[in-house]
Image: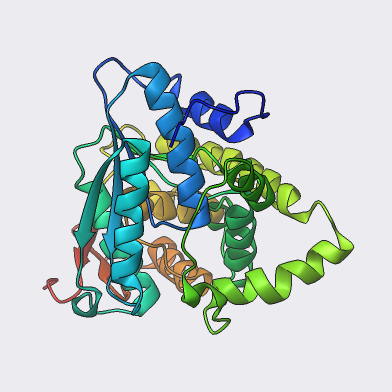
Amino acid sequence: MDVSRNKSFPDVVKKAVADCLGPRLRSGQSIGVAYSGGLDSTVLLRATASLAYEWSFPLIAIHVHHGLSQNADQWALHCQQICTELGVRAQISRVDVSRMGSGIEDAARRARYQVLSESAADWMLLAHHGNDQAETVLHNLLRGTGVRGAAAMPAERGKFLRPLLELSREALHDYACHFDLGWVEDESNQDSDYTRNYLRHQVMPIIQSRFPQAVMQLVGAARRFREAQCLLDELALVDIEGHVPAFPLPISLFVRLSTPRAKNLLRALLTWQDLQAPDERRLNEFVRQLKTAGADRHPRADFQSFCLFCGKGRIYLEPRGLQK
């Protein structure tokens, strides 16, 4: 497949990838693309392969074989063939999702990100686009999220980059059709028992029938929520008063803050530890105890995977089952 042809096409996808990589890519660095074989990642891979041809950087496509579909072997073969046509190195990584110990969706996601995280590529591109972002905003809001959740997926986190977040699914489909790309269809994407599929196939079309620009409006809202979250994180760094942003920390830091700022500091600290903040009710109660407990009281809160507890004037965090 000639990745340099059809230059007259207004290639918004390639431009988005170039705008993303341009300020970050350094000489000698390599790029990875998370490649499922579906429409979105096929478009991303082709656009990135075109840039690799022009900019001369090493490129690898990583396909995670979950083994959850009877078509999984065929998808892996398809991905290998497309990579051969594009002149891109392919890595097919098999994972055992059944051993992950959680729901299928979450287990598959964690297995996938583990493989991608362990890749030697300096930057890893993910194919999430504007419609994915809009669905994530809506999903998180309906779950009762705060500002961080409403910010949805970040364009950059560590070595992971999402260059297509400002583009619609329609733009990617137009690209695929223009370049006559082939892709696979995961049958599970039609199963509305999965919440995201329900939002995509049942809810979003109704919203868009009344608000045609809903997708891009939600993408813009996510961007503004992320800006607000950055300000809240900066406030948390101010409130930590020079301490290392990790537990244990003096209880006095939280006591002297207003309740909203104390909650914001706790949320930030947990996020920086890659932990999900507890729901609002439980967070409110723990902060209330922190601010009102006498010297002889030791507030404690047990959550799904960790525990917050107080002792000797400090707040500690430990995984569940290890605290004394």
Q: Is residue 309 visible?
A: yes
Question: Which sits in the foreground, 23 or 41?
Answer: 41
**Residue 245 location (% of width, % of height):** 30, 41
Q: Is residue 250 above or below residue 239?
A: below
Residue 206 in the image: above or below residue 273: below
Q: Residue at x 46, y 53 (%)?
A: 262
- Residue in front for this viewpoint, 39 or 223: 39
Q: Is residue 250 among the parts visible in the rendering?
A: no
Colour scheme in use:
rainbow
Camera-nearest residue between 33 and 267: 33
Q: Nearer the viewer, residue 27 or 3?
A: 3
**Residue projecting furthest to the top:** 27
Q: On the rendered image, what quadrant is the N terminus found in?
A: top left
Residue plotted at (30% across, 61% down): 76
In the picture, measured across the screen, residue 135 lies left or right of residue 259, that is: right
Question: Residue 140 is drawn in which quadrant?
Answer: bottom right
If the image is split into quadrants, where does the C terminus sit? bottom left
Residue at the spot 23% in from the left edge and 61% down from the top edge? 317
Q: Quick check: 204 left or right of 123? A: right
In percent of width and height, residue 215 lies at 72, 53
Q: Say whether residue 170 is left or right of residue 207.
A: left
Q: Residue at x 27, y 74 (%)?
A: 67
Depicted 15 relative to depicted 181: above or below: above
Q: Position of residue 4 (x, y in %)?
A: 49, 25
Position above or below: 172 against 320: above
